[in-house]
Image: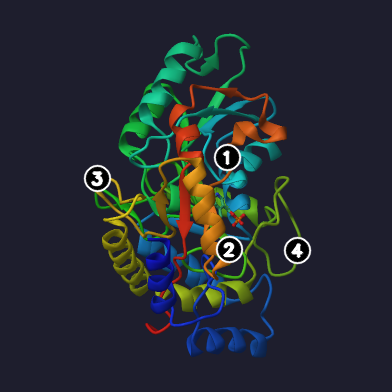
Amino acid sequence: MKDNIIEFIKDHYRTNEFIPLHEPRFDSREEELVLSTIQSTFVSSVGKYVDDFENGLRDYTHSNKAIAVVNGTGALYAALYHCGVEKNDIVITQALTFVATANAVNQLNAECAFVDVSKDTLGMCPNSLAEFLDSNAIIAEDNKCYLKNTGQQIKAVVPMHTFGHPVEIDKIADICDKWHLNLVEDAAESLGSYYKGRHTGTFGRYGAVSFNGNKIITTGGGGAILCRSEDDGVELKHLTTTAKQPHPYKFFHDKSGFNLRMPNLNAALGCAQLEKLTKFVLNKRQLAEQYEQLILNSPYSFVKEPRESHSNYWLNAIICEDIVQRDDFLEYTNRNGVMTRPVWELMIDLPMYKNCMANNLENSRWLAQRLVNLPSSVSVDIL
Ligand SMILES: *Cc1c(COP(=O)(O)O)cnc(C)c1O
């Protein structure tokens, strides 16, 4: 069976060379826009591509404003900062995620609390979130949410759409409303994914997207903040661009801002990539369907998009029966020229987050031992 999978992958990507997990695809359009940026000399913080890219993202996702920034971690950081997350506050996220989610919280000197994921979505489990709050939180007279035992304020909840598969974001949003918590979606992996017809990252106050080289589209490095409120968006754009008041030559900054703006050179690449996004999602969904058929008669099970969602299938994944079978699969495929990868270590098992609060993490632990990602780049021949 492992050989069937390897053969299928080599055939699909038409190569006998080592097949990476995810690589970007460019054609002459990327060259054209990047070259025109270089020739114009506007490679840095001034130029039209940042505006074009932001408007394109806003229209694609139907959010009210999109802000292009230097990376996805920066997008999460700025969004949480604008929600008022500060020293000693608590931010609830899922234990099974890429480390950037927790790092953004830590960089604000706030603390993570980890809840479990659901086996159906691989993302934050609404029941686990509700249970954590019911047992540990109170809403005080000031109408704010606090941890009962330490008195720390809980400011935000950050669910992550794992591998592009949407979490049950409407249930999570209801819980956040009930407990007066800000909802910030880590949509770094889910550009092009929808839940009940609505784009991921647009349910919360903010959604953070990433355009790192391994994501569905790339700007080299980059990220974006999707904003539900245009007013929030205008403030946050100001904050991420050194809080400079517009003026032809004077420098007046009205608060301590950040320099998180995406350079025009990267945005040019992003504009060319965004034109291809719809085609990329379609191609990835076709590959997922083929993987699903192939895995059908195997000891592994294929991770399918959750109910009522339309996933971008950024990274395809299978679930092995146990950790022994997983390690055997990883070893065999990587040795035979096909890159496969286990999922991330749980955040609570990393040294810097081991003392954080956590709920029962049964599903996270179960998945962490069994999940394997398969090569998921867009086909070479669709451009
Ligand atoms: C890629 C990613 C990010 C952001 O990564 P950057 O490299 O900073 O753009 C954040 N969260 C998750 C879950 C990611 O996969």
- In the foreground, 345 or 130: 345
Of marks 2 and 3, which one's residue comes earlier in the chain? 2
Residue located beneath label 4 in the image: 250
What amino acid is labelled 3 in the image? Arg
Q: Position of residue 122 (x, y in %)?
A: 41, 42
Instruction: Left or right? Give the position of 75 relative to 364.
Output: right
Q: Position of residue 347 (x, y in %)?
A: 60, 36
- Residue where numbered disc 1 is placed: 80
- From the Cβ of disc 2, is ligand 1 less than 8 Å away? yes
Q: State yes or no: discs 1 and 2 in contact (Cβ < 8 Å).
A: no
Q: Is residue 287 left or right of residue 146?
A: left
Q: Quadrant of the C terminus?
A: bottom left
Q: Amino acid at mark 1?
A: Leu
Q: Residue at x 59, y 41 (%)?
A: 345
- Label 4 to label 2: alpha-carbon separation: 34 Å
Q: Disc 4 on helix, strand or loop?
A: loop
Q: Quadrant of residue 266?
A: bottom right
> Residue 146 got which mark?
none
Give the crowd class for mark 3: few <14, some 14-19, many >=20 residues within 10 Å: some
Q: Residues within 10 Å of mark 2 (few under 14, many from 20)?
A: many
- Front in this rendered view, residue 313 or 274: 313
Sequence-first tag of 4 and 2: 2
Q: Report the residue marked by disc 3.
A: 307
Q: Nearer the viewer, mark 1 or mark 2?
A: 2
